[in-house]
Image (spheres, helix red, strand yellow):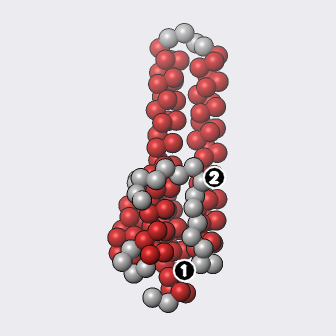
Amino acid sequence: MSENKQNTNAFLMHLSSFGGYLFPFGSIVVPLILWEIKKKDSKILDATGKEVINFNLSYLIYTTVLVITMIMVGVNFIFDDVNPLSLFFIISAAVLVGIISIIKFILIIIGAVKANQGDLYHYPLTINFMK
């Protein structure tokens, strides 16, 4: 596979993470499909696919933990005492989910640009589920 085509495919793998904005779990399903199709074409595409999937799974876990915690504190806030600390935590967690979403968006763009330049981009704070 030519280097230009390889870079383009790696670029598309990173951008496929935006599939999550189109349908639930799209940020995992779309990169997984692309990785399955292209992983045999080159080692770089195999590594890129794993990195993108690991990043999206990590992001899903971080966000899910925050949302579940927010819901639990929210239920406690509604049915128990009106505690200002609980309200502060709910607002803080919601803001944190928003910040993580913005960071994810920026990191996807950075990863896509690096891949288009031929670099293998490693997302920060990513859990390596697939090695």
Q: As displayed, is residue 76 above or below residue 120?
A: above
Q: As displayed, is residue 29 above or below residue 81?
A: below
Which kind of residue does numbered mark 1 sit on?
Asn
For image coordinates 46% across by 32% down, the residue present is: 68
From this viewpoint, is residue 34 visible? no
Q: How many marks?
A: 2
Q: Which mark is residue 120?
A: none
Q: Which mark is residue 103?
A: 2
- Left or right, residue 109 beside residue 8: right
Q: Which residue is mark 1?
A: 7
Q: Earlier in the sequence, mark 1 or mark 2?
A: 1
For image coordinates 48% across by 36% down, the residue present is: 65
For image coordinates 49% across by 29% down, the residue present is: 69
Which kind of residue does numbered mark 2 sit on?
Ile
Distance from disc 1 to disc 2, alpha carbons, whole Å, reads 23 Å
Q: Secondary structure at mark 1?
A: helix
Q: Residues within 10 Å of mark 2 (few under 14, many from 20)?
A: few
Q: Nearer the viewer, residue 51 or 89?
A: 51
Q: Quadrant of the N terminus?
A: bottom left
